[in-house]
Image (cartoon, grey):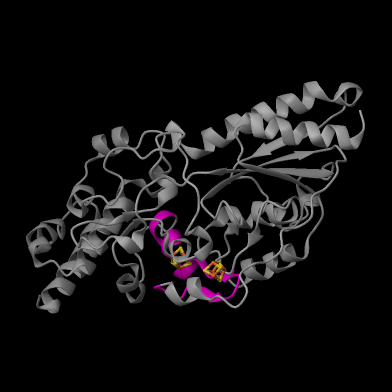
Amino acid sequence: MQIASITALIKQSARQAGFDLAGIAPARDFAELQHFPRWIAEGKAGEMKYMEARDQSANLKRASLRHVAPWARSVIVGAINYNTQHPCSNQIADPDRGWISRYAWSRDDYHDAVMRRLRRLEKDLRTGNGSLTTDLQTRCYVDTGPIVERVYAKYAGVGWIGKNTCIIHQRQGSWLFLGVILTSLDLAYDFPAPDRCGTCTRCIDACPTDALIAPYQLDANKCISYLTIEKRGAIPEEIRDGMGRHLFGCDICQDVCPWNRKAPTTSAPEFQPREGLVNPALEWLAEMKCDEFRERFRASPIRRAKLSGLRRNAVIAMGNSGQRKFQATLERLSSDPDPVVAGHARWAARKLAASGV
Ligand code: SF4
Ligand code: SF4
């Protein structure tokens, strides 16, 4: 089968599998990847050790596909819109409640939802390209593989990398889950998506912790998404004020992005929110017990924060709420058996007491 025909089949198959956008990039070392080793060396990845995974020759795996899949010739990138008809974080002001990032509301774990579609596409690729199937190699990744997906998404024409470091499509916006298939096939490649950020700096201006240290550059150590999801143990005191009432992740730099104003919404049942996760009550999460955490967040990305992290985040949010009515709860939590929760509760209680509200 001709390259053009296989490529057309992949695009058609991607649509049928449920991807809203799909494109193909060559498996090259694009210029953006050259910054990755320095970003790691400067400690901008925080404690995310998996980002520093190296091959046997001590090369950073994520710096080049040659380090992890030297056989790969092409990268197929699929994107799924997960936006739903619910308000943005900057449209909600109830101080008793906090924010869970939009991507984590869904009924199904997005890794599974995207991987299901990738597997279907991979199957079509293997069964649909005739004589080329014999020595075809493929590998699917959703979010956790040793590949910087957004770089390949850009070169596959799926969207440009915004100054907020997210992939943005001019019609779909940036509420996108990405999945990739590496393949040994040579395919017809898409053009990279042009950068449409222009002179806008809304995301940089709106970031409450100055985590966007320059356009297109994130310091994870300051990013609320990293702090609330990946960071274990104590959160540096100097950054807690800026975390506001974020409980898991942060959507601010996407909520303010003009390209999301008219972003379409999905009606797919798997991406509709679980009950109670849009703008949840702070006290509910601060006092959550192990059994409820396991039950409520079964197959949810929120499990990544672990119960201790989620409760720690809720306690910080209570301290930032200005609501003196949380004082009694915080004082009780100051002697919680979890020392992380207890330590942050003491900080939050002191902050509320000092606020004089
Ligand atoms: S996710 Fe939040 S904290 Fe992180 S860069 Fe965006 S606005 Fe800043
Ligand atoms: S807010 Fe503006 S600068 Fe930031 S990603 Fe969106 S368009 Fe680009």
Q: Where is residue 206 in the image (x, y as percent from the top left)?
A: 43, 73
Q: Is residue 214 magenta?
A: yes
Q: For this view, does 25 lie left or right of residue 114?
A: right
Q: Quadrant of ligand 2?
A: bottom right
Which of 250 and 2 lies nearest the eye of the viewer? 2
Query: What residue is shown at x 75% (from left), y 55% (from top)?
Result: 155
Residue 273 higher or lower than 211, as above or below: above
Question: Can you say which quadrant of the picture contains the C terminus?
Answer: bottom left
Q: Can residue 43 be seen in this view?
A: no
Q: For this view, does 187 lie left or right of residue 220?
A: right
Q: Can residue 120 be seen in this view?
A: yes
Question: Can you say which quadrant of the picture contains the N terminus?
Answer: top right
Q: Is residue 120 magenta?
A: no
Q: Quarter of the image holding residue 142?
A: top right
Q: Position of residue 153 (x, y in %)?
A: 68, 52
Q: How many marks?
A: 0
Q: For this view, does 248 lie left or right of residue 212?
A: left
Residue 197 higher or lower than 17, as above or below: below
Which of 207 and 327 lies nearest the eye of the viewer? 207
Q: Where is residue 210 in the image (x, y as percent from the top left)?
A: 45, 76
Q: Position of residue 269 (x, y in %)?
A: 43, 32
Q: What stretch is highlighted in magenta?
A: 208-229
Query: What residue is shown at x 47% (from left), y 40% (from top)?
Result: 266
